[in-house]
């Protein structure tokens, strides 16, 4: 109740209602682990309906960079910390700002070698996985199939060139892929031709006894 008295000692009273609104509570800090060069979003759950969330780059002051329960980020490059405040429908603002922490996940590097690059059909090649920061692997050997082994051994049955691809995946589910084009060449096995006769008469036609085979390395 408010009472007002003038200079003539005349007075009057009136009632004034003062409403005290609750300051919105700030939610617990949130964190997100993401892979470099990927997109992500930070989302605040359990927000009281009608409240507004403002996002900032700073713990106090600064400009609002976005409003809403979700803040989307494209092409994450580094570890980062963003801040958020809650504003009620009565324009009461949370006393502090919460943190939204972005952590870069472990980034693997995919690499490998092979113990041969040119072979005959039905030959096995051993692959040596030299990837780092990875614990899961996916190999693609084209028509010869795939493997999830760390160091697979693959038999190449078909003649031709092969592209070999390896994807390495870290414990944070981040990945890296390496593709080696035309890494393996498989030579075709051909039939051996052994002549039944020769004519060493100096006419330059069938003068020598010769065994023909494209892929023979040694002949004893």
Image (cartoon, rainbow, N blue to C red):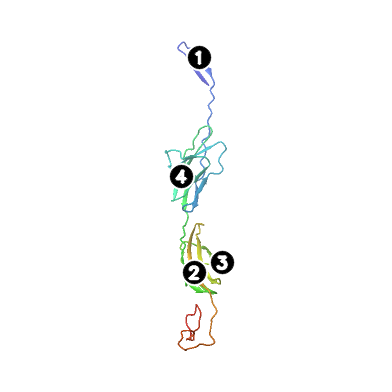
Q: Which percent across, then down, holds residue 51? A: 54, 37
91 and 185: which is toward the camera? 185
Label placed on residue 82 = 4
Whole-angstrom CA distance, mark 1 to mark 4, is 56 Å
Q: Are marks 3 and 2 in contact (CB under 8 Å)?
A: no
Q: Which percent across, then down, holds residue 182? A: 48, 66
158 and 5: which is toward the camera? 158
Q: Earlier in the sequence, mark 3 or mark 2?
A: 3
Whole-angstrom CA distance, mark 2 to mark 1, is 104 Å
Q: Earlier in the sequence, mark 2 or mark 1?
A: 1
Question: Dot 3 lies on which element?
Answer: helix
Whole-angstrom CA distance, mark 4 to mark 2, is 49 Å
Q: Which residue is mark 2?
A: 184
Residue 81 at least partly seen: yes
109 and 2: which is toward the camera? 109
Q: Earlier in the sequence, mark 3 or mark 1?
A: 1
Q: Are marks 2 and 1 in contact (CB under 8 Å)?
A: no
In front: mark 4 or mark 2? Answer: 2
Whole-angstrom CA distance, mark 3 to mark 2, is 12 Å
In front: mark 1 or mark 4? Answer: 4
19 and 3: which is toward the camera? 19
Q: Earlier in the sequence, mark 1 or mark 4?
A: 1
7 is higher (above) or lower (below) than 109: above
Q: Which residue is mark 1?
A: 11
């Amino acid at each position: 109740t408010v009472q007002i008295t003038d200079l003539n000692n005349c007075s009057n009273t009136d009632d004034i209602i003062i409403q005290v609104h609750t300051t919105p509570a700030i939610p617990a800090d949130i964190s997100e682990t993401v892979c470099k060069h990927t997109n992500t979003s930070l989302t605040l759950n359990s927000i009281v309906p009608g409240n507004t969330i403002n996002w900032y780059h700073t713990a106090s002051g600064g400009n609002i960079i976005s409003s809403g329960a979700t803040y989307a980020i494209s092409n994450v490059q580094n570890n980062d910390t963003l801040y958020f405040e809650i504003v009620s429908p009565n324009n009461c603002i949370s006393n502090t700002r919460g943190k939204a922490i972005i952590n870069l996940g472990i980034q693997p590097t995919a690499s490998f070698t092979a113990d041969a690059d040119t072979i005959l059909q039905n030959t096995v090649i051993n692959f040596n996985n030299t990837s780092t920061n990875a614990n899961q692997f996916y190999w693609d050997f084209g028509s010869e199939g795939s493997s999830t082994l760390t160091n697979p051994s693959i038999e190449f049955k078909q003649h031709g060139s092969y592209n070999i691809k390896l994807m390495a995946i870290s414990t944070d589910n981040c990945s890296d892929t390496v593709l080696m084009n035309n890494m393996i060449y498989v030579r075709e096995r051909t039939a051996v031709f052994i002549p039944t006769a020769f004519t060493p008469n100096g006419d330059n036609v069938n003068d020598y006894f010769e065994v023909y085979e494209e892929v023979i390395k040694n002949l004893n």
